[in-house]
Amino acid sequence: MNDAKPEPLAFEIRTANTILYCDRFHETVRFYRDVLGFPVLLSKSWFVEFAINPLARLSVADSTRTTLKSSGGQGLTLTFQVDDVISLHSRLSALDCSPTPMVSHAWNATLFHVHDPEGHRLEFWAPSETKS
């Protein structure tokens, strides 16, 4: 048996994009554009790409127009580290987005979840303040 490790591939990833295939395309686009305020980079009748930050993107595709179908929001959590998780929780509560209660985890994070109209779970978190 050969235990030699293969040479790593030499390439640089310049951006990362996650594509969500959605049955509730228009509602999901409105959620990311109008509720979360993600800037639109590209908009077609069946595909919208949002900027999350300069290196990360999120796209929403109309599953009725693609070969891949919606997962119904199952098996995926999008996680976003934010500066002020408490204020974001309050803002999303005021917008009737039904965020879960805030929780603190042992790995020094405070977080909550919301679901987009397609059912994808979004986790917003910030490092918990440590006490000296």
Image (tube, rainbow, N blue to C red):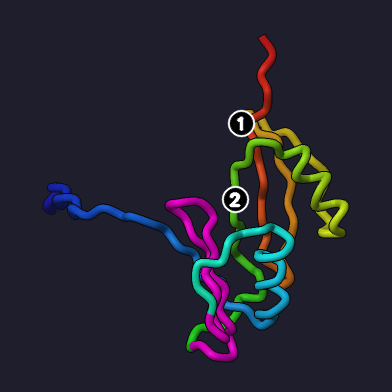
The percent position of residue 106, horizontal first and vertical second, equals 66, 30
Q: At which x and y percent is residue 124?
A: 67, 46
Horizontal side, residue 115 vs residue 70: left or right? right
Q: Is residue 75 left or right of residue 24?
A: left
What residue is rendered at 65% in x and 72% in y? Answer: 29
* Residue 65, x across and y down, in percent: 54, 90
Q: Residue at x 59, y 50 (%)?
A: 79
> Compared with residue 102, is residue 29 higher up or lower down, i.e. above or below?
below
The kind of residue tagged 1 is: Trp
Label 2 SS: strand
- The amino acid type found where label 2 is placed reads Thr
User: In the drawing, what numbered circle is on residue 19?
Assistant: none
Distance (Cα) linking label 2 and label 1? 15 Å
| Residue 118 quadrant | bottom right
Question: Residue sitting at 71 percent across and 64 percent down?
Answer: 34
Asked if the stretch drawn in magenta spans residue 61, the answer is: yes
Q: Which residues are magenta?
A: 44-66
- Can you say whether 90 is above or below 120 in the image? above
What percent of the width, then of the height, locates residue 39? 58, 61
- In the structure shown, which secondary structural element does the residue marked by tag 1 occupy? loop
Please tell me which of labels 2 and 1 falls first in the chain: 2
Q: Name the residue beneath numbered marker 1.
A: 107
Marks 2 & 1, CB-CB < 8 Å contact: no
Q: Is residue 60 magenta?
A: yes
Q: Badge 2 local density, few (<14 within 10 Å), some, or many (20+)?
A: few
The residue at 66%/75% (across/down) is: 72
Q: Is residue 81 above or below residue 54?
A: above
Q: Which residue corresponds to mark 2?
A: 79
Magenta span: predominant SS is strand
Quadrant location, the C terminus: top right
